[in-house]
Image (spheres, helix red, strand yellow):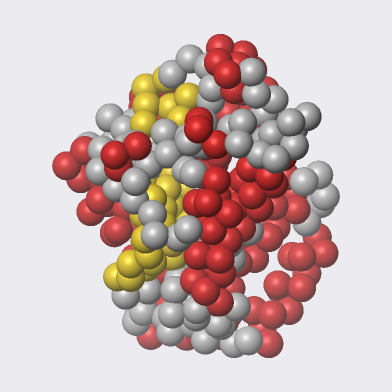
Amino acid sequence: MSEPLVVTRDGAVAVLTIDRPEKRNAMTAGMWAALPAVLAPLADDPGVRTLIVTGAGPSFCAGADISDLLSGPDPADPMADLRRDNLAAQAALRDFPKPTVAMIRGHCIGGGVEIAACCDLRFTDPTGVFGVTPAKVGIVYTPSSTKALIDLVGPAMTKYLLFSGELIDAPTALRAGLVDQLVPAEDLEAEVHRFADVLASRSALSQRATKEVVATLTAGSDGEGPAARWYRETIAGGELAEGVAAFAERRPPRFPWPTR
């Protein structure tokens, strides 16, 4: 079921839209299962340099469709299949090899926060409302989703969100670190696309290296191994030479390194 996950292109920028506005873009079990296959061709396409993730209409994503929570075949763990597909979808987005930006309006709740947290950056307008609500329905939040929250907002704010299920507004989310930019509603789409175009113009090698090194560092390693490999690649692939030449000639660089 990929129909509610719509991909469009604007040059080097791909836009993934969660398109179920009548349900505030809540993710069904089928949508979680479909997401890795939707992302895979974008990851492999050298013409795609940046990915924007957003929701149709006035909401980003109101979470997992609650009607799926008890629909699994194992009565001892009816969420097992949903949890598996949810985690696979998050991993596919988190490991996407190019910069990803969540463009958030309205409700960003539960699974919506999981999706946003798996993106590299998060932009919202003042309508953004954020919450993580497992305590409201008796769900144990997964360790990987908990760690993603800790990495963004720290242990205390993670506990606040998970203990209470309270919703926070966009300015609070910005102060907490849950989002990176708060943009006026009328400017949000233009600003996100402007920034995505900036990302698409930069060195894909540098961006890929940054994603890998940051992931390694947040996993507890020192990052030296991946960094050393990328240092060599920037010379072998001609990336550094082109960047220096473009700077000296006062022209936009034409970086040779492919995105895969």
**Point 50% across, 30% down: residue:** 66
The answer, for residue 14, to whether it is visible in the render is yes
**Residue furthest top as drawn:** 164
Using the rendered image of the protein, determine whether residue 206 is visible from the camera's viewpoint: no
On the picture, is 84 further left or further right than 197? right
Q: On the picture, is 213 further left or further right than 122?
A: right
Question: Residue 41 at x, y = what percent?
Answer: 52, 74
The residue drawn where x is 55% and y is 82% is: 258
Foreground of the two, 86 or 10: 86
Q: Please tell me which residue is depicted at 44% across the width and 65% down the height of the picture.
A: 50
Q: From this viewpoint, which residue is outermost toward the left?
A: 186
Is residue 174 shown left or right of residue 218?
left
**Image spot of residue 131 (x, y percent):** 48, 24
Residue 33: % across, % down: 58, 54
**Quadrant location of the C terminus in the rendered image:** bottom right
Q: In percent of the image, x 43 and y 18: which residue is there?
A: 167
Residue 201 percent across, percent down from the top left: 40, 72
Picture quadrant of residue 229: bottom right
Whether 117 is drawn above or below 256: the answer is above
Vertical arrangement, residue 157 with respect to residue 76, above or below = above
